[in-house]
Image: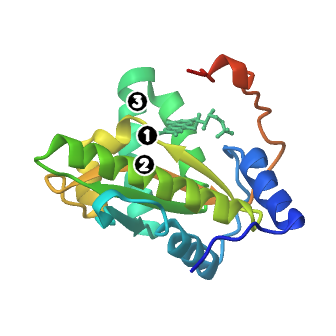
Amino acid sequence: MSVESYADDERAVVERVLRERRTVHDFRPEAVPESLVERALELARWAPNHHRTEPWRFYLLGPRARAAIAELNAGLVAARQGERAAEIKLKRWQAVPGWLVMTSSASVDALREQEDYAACCCAAQNFMLALWSAGVGVKWTTGAVVREAGFADIVGLDPLAERVVGLFWYGWPAGPLTEQQRRPLDACLVRRA
Ligand SMILES: Cc1cc2nc3c(=O)[nH]c(=O)nc-3n(C[C@H](O)[C@H](O)[C@H](O)COP(=O)(O)O)c2cc1C
């Protein structure tokens, strides 16, 4: 294999998808075809990963697991903000059409675990960009619910062997996207002689 410069129009597409992807908070109710999601996961696996550990695992959640997580979260919200807030949150979560949990391998070696998590974050971006290019939006969440013991049970993940990278909601965007800005490049670019 060799590296060749992509054609200008191909590079423009890559730039567009990198720049225009936005976190989506509100979804239309229709389910995203599983073939699209599988394709995005297949692409996610091409992320860089040190020592080629391929540390990711993807859990695609069906209706029972989704409902159980939404209930678990509503319990947390009720304790913090009361029943009314919990009810609203429950309805909102129940309406999310696509649910994926990504985990990263845990390790007794702290550096290995950090690098594996970094690789999974790259995989997450691949996943989000692949879906975005098909018009599907994603929200990556790391809310309190993912750290609840009950969460691991519902998903069926092994909390001793896996770290939760995130819960990823996906679907066709409903309504306008949240405007985003980034600081100028100069704010984070340091040149050294
Ligand atoms: C590790 C990680 C965790 C995140 N968790 C949440 C979350 O719990 N709730 C939320 O609303 N957004 C969450 N986000 C999305 C960020 O809020 C979002 O990426 C940020 O506002 C920038 O917007 P953009 O994705 O549209 O560029 C998370 C993003 C990352 C990378």
Q: Is 169 left or right of 185, judged from the image as shown?
A: left
**Dot 3: what SS?**
helix
Q: Classify mark 1: residues with Cα within 10 Å, few (<14), some (14-19) or many (20+).
A: few
**Dot 1: what SS?**
loop
Q: Which residue is mark 3?
A: 78
Look at the picture and state if 111 lies above or below 156: above
**Dot 2: what SS?**
strand
Q: Is residue 79 visible?
A: yes
Where is residue 181 shown, x and y percent of the image? 76, 27
Q: Is 116 left or right of 60, judged from the image as shown?
A: left
Q: Which residue is mark 1?
A: 142
Q: Amino acid at mark 1?
A: Thr
Q: Which of these two is toward me, 168 or 165?
A: 165
Q: Is residue 149 visible?
A: no
Q: Locate the C terminus by quadrant.
A: top right
Marks 1 and 2 in Cβ contact (< 8 Å): yes
Q: Which residue is mark 2?
A: 166
Kindly report the distance in space between the C-alpha atoms of the residues bearing marks 2 and 3: 22 Å
Residue at the spot x=25%, y=54% of the render?
152
Q: Residue furthest front?
A: 193
State yes or no: Cβ of the residue under disc 1 lies below 8 Å from any atom of ligand 1. yes
Question: Which tag, 1 or 2, sits closer to the chain's start?
Answer: 1
Q: Classify mark 2: residues with Cα within 10 Å, few (<14), some (14-19) or many (20+).
A: many
* Residue 114 found in image quarter: top left
